[in-house]
Image (spheres, grey):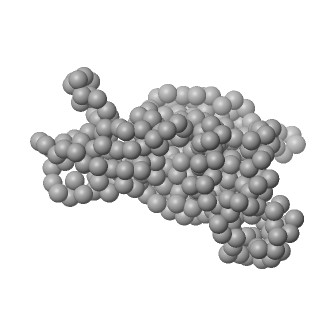
């Protein structure tokens, strides 16, 4: 999986044409608005700032929005005692923004004791197709190259504002989101009406080039009050889930909660077996071992057998076999193999090296 610092994920990915899931190395580092030098002062302002950072962090790793967090007494106690989880106050990013680093191991242990599932550092990449009707005779698809599109300045300004909101919320929630280029290749596959009418095959065909893990698509309009409302759906391999109507922030909150449920870490450490086929060289072997060692939910990776082009690994995972299956299914390094159905007596997960 690719590893990046989260503050630049959206900028890096909006133009990419070859993507797999990413590992958010600085998931537990939160940037808060704070112009005062509060670090180490012991002041109420320092405690309040840590609490603000904890709210944002809890949202990132549980998928819960702030309303749910403040309604949960256990989470409120974590917010009130946020200082004990802080291992780094600073550096200051600018005169109004401060970086706060939280201890991931300590907080994850606390959440495990409270039986609250958490979402790890491996995060799927989401491609967003967004058809927008201004109500003034303009209909278009939001693009990462808005400035290059033949649209009115008012529509460009609106799309730029929406683009900035996506960037802001995706960074806050630690959701890697990309937008289409909307170049000649894209417009040969898809038009706004395809998105509005939910033509799944058209949307998936247009999405293939981006190699995203999931597709979020929406058709939206601007209300008489200038508020953007849209109907949102998520799509993966032909399976669609409706999120309903709401704002962009609502949709990304729903997306975060959905992913948190799909990839939640809960329970004790599990001993699991994974068989990887297509190991034809020492490079294949070494790259596969490195790949598994890079996964944050795996505490140990031990090769136990190499034979006839297959590698069997025994791993200790924070979570169950379904979680590991979901995580491995995000990355383009491996593809699911049906070998386990052909050999029902062999347990564990089966994947094939993608070449």
Q: Which quadrant of the rendered structure holds the N terminus? A: bottom left
Q: Residue at x 42, y 48 (%)?
A: 298
For residue 61, side relative to residue 66 (left or right): left
In this view, 37 is above or below 33: below
Name the one closer to the observer, 116 or 161.
116
In this view, 61 is above or below 235: below
In this view, 274 is above or below 30: above
For residue 341, side relative to residue 10 (left or right): left
Q: Residue at x 74, y 44 (%)?
A: 75
Residue 245 on image: x %, y %: 73, 32
Q: How many marks?
A: 0
Name the one closer to the observer, 336 or 128.
336
Name the one closer to the observer, 181 or 260.
260
Residue 285 on image: x %, y %: 22, 53
For residue 302, side relative to residue 137 (left or right): left
Dividing the picture into quadrants, the one containing residue 151 is: bottom right
Q: Residue at x 77, y 38 (%)?
A: 72
Residue 336 on image: x %, y %: 32, 36
Q: Report if residue 203 is visible in the image.
A: no
Q: Report if residue 48 is visible in the image.
A: yes
For residue 140, side relative to residue 287 (left or right): right
Q: Residue at x 19, y 47 (%)?
A: 279
Residue 239 on image: x %, y %: 49, 27
In this view, 71 is above or below 93: above
């Amino acid at each position: 999986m690719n590893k990046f610092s989260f503050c630049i994920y959206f900028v890096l990915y909006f133009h990419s044409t070859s993507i797999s899931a990413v590992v958010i190395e600085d998931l537990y580092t939160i940037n808060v608005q704070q112009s005062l030098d509060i670090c180490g002062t012991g002041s109420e302002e320092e405690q309040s700032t840590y609490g603000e950072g904890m709210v944002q962090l809890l949202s990132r790793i549980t998928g819960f929005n702030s309303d749910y967090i403040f309604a949960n007494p256990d989470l409120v106690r974590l917010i009130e005692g946020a200082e004990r989880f802080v291992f780094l106050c600073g550096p200051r990013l600018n005169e109004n923004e401060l970086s706060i680093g939280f201890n991931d191991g300590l907080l994850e242990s606390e959440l495990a004791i409270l039986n609250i599932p958490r979402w790890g550092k491996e995060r799927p990449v989401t491609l967003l197709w967004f058809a927008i009707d201004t109500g003034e005779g303009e209909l278009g698809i939001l693009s990462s190259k808005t400035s290059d599109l033949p649209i009115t300045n008012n529509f460009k300004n609106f799309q730029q504002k929406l683009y900035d909101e996506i960037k802001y919320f995706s960074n806050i929630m630690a959701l890697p989101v990309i937008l289409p280029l909307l170049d000649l290749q894209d417009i040969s596959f898809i038009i706004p009406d395809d998105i509005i009418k939910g033509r799944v095959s058209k949307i998936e065909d247009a999405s293939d080039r981006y190699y995203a893990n999931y597709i979020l698509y929406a058709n939206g309009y601007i209300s008489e009050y200038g508020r953007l409302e849209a109907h949102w759906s998520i799509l993966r391999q032909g399976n669609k889930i409706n999120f309903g109507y709401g704002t962009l922030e609502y949709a990304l909150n729903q997306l975060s909660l959905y992913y948190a449920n799909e990839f939640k870490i809960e329970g004790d450490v599990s001993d699991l077996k994974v068989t990887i086929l297509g190991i034809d060289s020492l490079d294949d072997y070494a790259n596969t071992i490195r790949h598994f060692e890079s996964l944050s939910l795996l505490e140990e990776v031990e090769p136990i057998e190499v034979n006839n082009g297959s590698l069997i690994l025994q791993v200790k995972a924070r979570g169950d076999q379904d979680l590991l299956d979901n995580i491995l299914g995000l990355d383009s390094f491996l593809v699911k193999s049906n070998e386990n159905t052909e050999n029902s007596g062999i347990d564990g997960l089966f994947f094939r090296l993608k070449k």
